[in-house]
Amino acid sequence: MSAILVPVDGSVHALKALRIAGDLADKYGGKIVLLHVLVPDRKAGRILSLPIADVLPPKMGAALGAAAGAPGARARVPEAVLKAVGEKVLEDAAAKVHRRGIDVEVM
């Protein structure tokens, strides 16, 4: 069985890549391997602009909102919040793959 590696970050582009990878996995009997890389300098405002932001738990959204509103252009998002967002991104992507009946592995 072939595996297709799909890096996901919650963006519209990653969702499109996931859809295309799903089509290929369907056609050729492959599985999807999802990968999310934690980006420590990711700005809160950028995370809040992702489609995944709509389904983040309220506490996480509040922490991101606080970081986005902090003074200074370099306000950092707490690492725990970044990890939680990454887990949510992977969870959401895996659910999309599962709904299509395709085997999925999460890294």
Image (cartoon, helix red, strand yellow):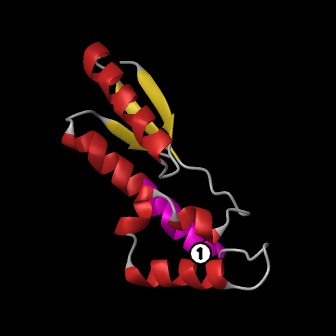
Please state which amino acid type lies under the numbered disc 1: Ala
Residue 21 x %, y %:
39, 27
Q: Which residue is mark 1?
A: 80
Q: For this rendering, which residue is in front, 33 or 21?
A: 21
Residue visible at 55% across and 81% down in the picture? 65
Q: Secondary structure at mark 1?
A: helix
Question: Magenta stretch?
Answer: 78-89
Task: Classify mark 1: residues with Cα within 10 Å, few (<14), some (14-19) or many (20+).
Answer: few
Q: For this rendering, which residue is in front, 39 or 53?
A: 53
Residue 99 higher or lower than 62, as above or below: above
Q: For this rendering, which residue is in front, 84 or 75?
A: 75
The stretch drawn in magenta includes residue 79: yes
User: Could you tell whether 94 is left or right of 82 in the image?
Assistant: left
Residue 63 x %, y %:
55, 83
The stretch drawn in magenta includes residue 85: yes
Residue 43 x %, y %:
67, 66
Residue visible at 20% across and 43% down in the picture? 99
Residue 26 higher or lower than 61, as above or below: above
Residue 14 x %, y %:
48, 41
* Image quadrant in which the N terminus is located: top left
Quadrant of the rendered image containing residue 40: bottom right
